[in-house]
Amino acid sequence: MNNLAELPITALKGVGDKFAQVLGKLHVSTVQDLLFHLPLRYQDRTRVTPIAALTPGLDAVIEGEVRAADVVFGRRRSLVVRLQDGSGTITLRFFHFSAAQKNRFARGARLRCYGEARRGSAGLELYHPETEIVGEETAPHPDTLTPVYPLTEGVSQGRLRGLMLQALDLLERGGVTELLPTELLPAAMRYPLADALRYLHTPPAGVDLAQLAEGQHPAQQRLAIEELLAHHLSLLEVRRGNAAIAAPPLSANAALERDFLSRLPFSLTGAQQRVCAEIAEDLASHRPMMRLLQGDVGAGKTLVAALAALKAIGTGAQVAVMAPTEILAEQHRRNFCGWLEPLGISVAWLTGSLKAAERRAQLAAIASGEAQLVVGTHALFQPEVVFHNLALVIIDEQHRFGVRQRLELREKGSADGAAGRLQPHQLIMTATPIPRTLAMSAFADLDCSVIDELPPGRQPINTVAISNERREEVMQRVQTAVAEGRQAYWVCTLIEESESLQAQAAETTANELAEVLTGMRIALVHGRLKPDEKERVMAAFKAGEVDLLVATTVIEVGVDVPNASLMIIENPERLGLAQLHQLRGRVGRGSIASHCVLLYGTPLSQNGRARLQALRQHSDGFAIAEEDLRLRGPGEILGTRQTGEIQHRIADLQRDAHLLPQVQRIAAAPALDESARRALIARWLQNKPRYAEA
């Protein structure tokens, strides 16, 4: 079969029906889908680095002879292997190991390792490196860079790379259709599609790694413009569909709103009042509100959302508030209960971790209309959740949900009215500031409101960038802060998409900190913890029972601990500026001076240095977003992406903003026929045009 868009993934050797279901979580169902599942980054395994030449924070291949392998009992049992080559000696440390693994590392054995060198108590160490015994069967070093792909549970990098080689072999025989007429592409991007795919899966040794990391290679830009075009075309379809929808008009209940405002210990800022007026005008209309509410960390978006909710509740309707994580949903529940329950308004709670009996009770309250406001996670759009009269949907951090989920929640509020099919109004909140030019393109079907004023009294956060070579100084800084009665975060960032790898990195860091920081209460939170375990750790941190919280980026939004005044972010150069700004916003929430330490790996690229400098100079999220756009930093393509989300695979809206005018020009060109438009949407959005990112 020539057309790889129609060749099922089960046509590849080693993919049965069960594994095909696992790959389905990555939106891979055909061989073409697999080819468009692009690497997040690359590892250079093409050469061996002498141990003496290792740089802390960088991944490398080393080879050497095992001099010793001992089980050491410190704060935690670990296997310590000493490896020596002609230039020097290094320690390999394993916290998870078996007797068989220990026996592999016999004295005199020759070992090849791959991992990241870190400074340890006895010089440089590699934590949990990949290892193989060097012998006659050892594979030669590859002559191309090694791709690192987004993963989901049940798929390893090795297995995915093996499948990709089969797919590339099929690509050699043709089968990926050029959908864009060459004359529509800018001259610099007339790069054959098959060549671009081949290059990005197997870049040759010696390639400019910085250019690839920053998404500037012509092969990347060729695919980025096609992906942005597919999203733009699908947005046009969404907009056409929305034009025919009606919604219930929601008028103000002045007495209820006066009662609410009179109980607040502060007044609304001018920006909050302006945005509330914009939302009120939308809600009074017969057309569904589709409004994006932007506001920096701490600008008071939730309060604006509560006032919008009162408009619906005041007319006897229901409101749903959806958040991407249980931590953030719980934060909203506490806020809304505190504000609305004194007004006699019933707040329900729905997440995946509720016990069966409690869940049944909440579902009944939602279905009967007894629950006037429902706060929850993605559990809100499960089939068994039936609303009595849903008129307003409020979604926080919408970019973390697939738009498919957002539309499913909207469908739950659909009802038949005099004007035909009625659908609820939508208010979408984000603390990730989006430059205006970008918002016009990326959120073209939404109206936009901005809270551009912070409430008085917020403490500025002092941000410093420190090299990982001064790691011990930073640990001492944590010790001092805790001794003064403060709490701290230590955030571990890892590019790999696998939650198990992220959890392992955080666990390794927590163990390392526990060995150095004596007498400190350290807790760990990551994406693999069960929701109730995560909640328990966060509650202990909030209650002051934990001094140092070691976490992955799961704490990016929704965590409010006023006594936490110090934030350490490891490898900040791996995250987008917006995400770093979000993480930094977890401190500075009390009345005490707060600090954020960006603990970067060396050497730092020029672009990385400029981005960290921007974060140090600016506290305003919109200034940071504009700077990110100016630098065209790697953004989300090198940041953490939630596994399984529908989103961009190679394009980055901030980095590739300069392509958007060309995308709009191509979309309007008569030379792009209807069949090509449909095929583009299908290629990039898995035949779900209405689920484009809005």
Image: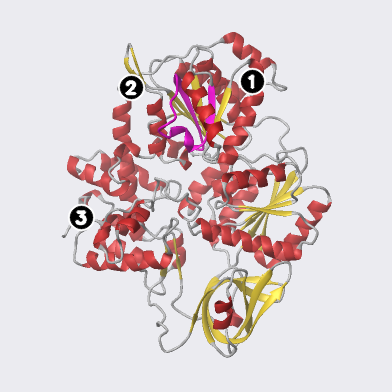
Which quarter of the image is occupied by the C terminus? top left
The answer to which of 489 and 337 lies nearer the viewer is 337
Q: Is residue 383 visible in the rendered structure shown here?
A: yes
What residue is drawn where x is 62% and y is 21%? 340
Q: N-terminal of the two: label 1 or label 2? A: 2
Question: In the picture, residue 234 is in which quadrant?
Answer: top left
Residue type beneath disc 3 = Thr
Q: Is residue 352 left or right of residue 479?
A: left
Q: Which residues are magenta?
A: 373-397
Callout 2: SS = loop
Residue type beneath disc 1 = Glu
Q: Is residue 54 left or right of residue 290?
A: right
Foreground tag (1 vs 2): 1
Give the residue at mark 1: 341
Instruction: Residue 145: give x, y in percent of width and height.
Output: 41, 71
Instruction: Residue 350: give x, y in percent of width and height.
Output: 53, 33
In this picture, is 356 found above or below 653? above
Q: Residues within 10 Å of mark 1 (few under 14, many from 20)?
A: few
The answer to which of 113 and 669 lies nearer the viewer is 113
